[in-house]
Amino acid sequence: MTTQTHYAGGIEPGIYPDIPDTKYHAAKDILSSSGARRLITSTPRKFYEEMTTERPYNPAFEIGHAAHTLMLTVGDPFEVVDADSWRTKDAKAARDAALQAGNTPLLAKEYAQVRAMADAILDHPVTGELFTRNDTTSEQSLYWKDEQTGVACRARPDLAVNDWSLIVDYKTTVSADPREFAKSIAKYGYHQQQAWYCEAVETLTGIRPEFVFVCQEKTPPYEVSLIQLDADAVRIGGRLNEDARSIYAACMDSGVWPSYPTSVQVVGLPAWALKQADQETGIEAPF
């Protein structure tokens, strides 16, 4: 049975190619993939605080944002500041002015970094072709309603083939090694993200797309890897998304966004620590 519709923002379900990213991200009352992941890994109260609070400036975020802008040819324009760091009064003033104008502030050395990253992507035998295809569209905004919960949802894939047969998600990361990226998948919920985006496309078009992560390191030589998730990861991600929407709907209905339990919680060591203790002390782990 479907609950009341939790739809807001005045945007009807559909695919919108020309919505600015500022407008897309401003619709915080329409649940996104990052919001769904936050509901799973944190508390509803923290999610609500973030939903109703402006994001503070984060240089690490701006580097990734700038790299996306160069690769996808969309987004905020750059404001390159000729300074060695943001510590000086003049640099801070230039940064704040850029942010106030809705631009992405970058130090000159940061701009050189993201330009080198873009060049490495374009020089790669697979990603170079992928990001220069003439049958793709970047950062389209997708809006749909989850029929089970009535929750309004949104997604904004980095790049998609125009027939929706493939979605490409570009990640900047410390390590593009597939073994290391597997840890990032679990830590940041990228399996939820893939399931969320694929659900969006399938709901609106009837097509279940393929999905690939293009991962790039943020230090020279800016190496690149291409990663696809296995079926189990995507299935688990989809189930977590269902849980997140159920939590969101319950909070919207009640107006209550719970925090941590108020009672005392009993916890033990994680499995890896128990195994380590077993190896080091001879205490047998209970499994």
Image: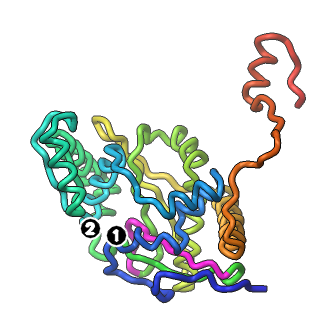
The numbered disc on residue 5 is: none
Which residue in the protein does label 1 denote? 21
Find numbered disc 1 in the image and state the secondary structure of the residue it sits on. helix
The kind of residue on which mark 2 rests is Val
Q: Is residue 175 magenta?
A: no
The numbered disc on residue 74 is: 2
Q: Residues within 10 Å of mark 2 (few under 14, many from 20)?
A: some
Question: Is the N terminus in the top left, top right, bottom left or bottom right quadrant?
Answer: bottom right
Q: Is residue 98 above or below residue 110?
A: below
Q: Is residue 173 above or below residue 84?
A: below
> x, y (%) of residue 115?
20, 48
Q: Are marks 1 and 2 in contact (CB under 8 Å)?
A: yes
Q: Is residue 62 left or right of residue 146?
A: left
> Between residues 181 and 33, which one lies in front from this camera angle?
33
Residue at horizontal 52%, vertical 60%? Answer: 34
Residue at horizontal 18%, vertical 55%? Answer: 97
> Between residues 263 and 1, which one lies in front from this camera angle?
263
Find numbered disc 2 in the image and state the secondary structure of the residue it sits on. loop
> x, y (%) of residue 162?
38, 79
Q: How many marks?
A: 2
The kind of residue on which mark 1 rests is Asp
Q: Earlier in the sequence, mark 1 or mark 2?
A: 1
Residue at horizontal 71%, vertical 72%? Answer: 254
Specify start and end residues of the magenta stretch as a single range.
150-162
Quadrant location of residue 25? bottom left
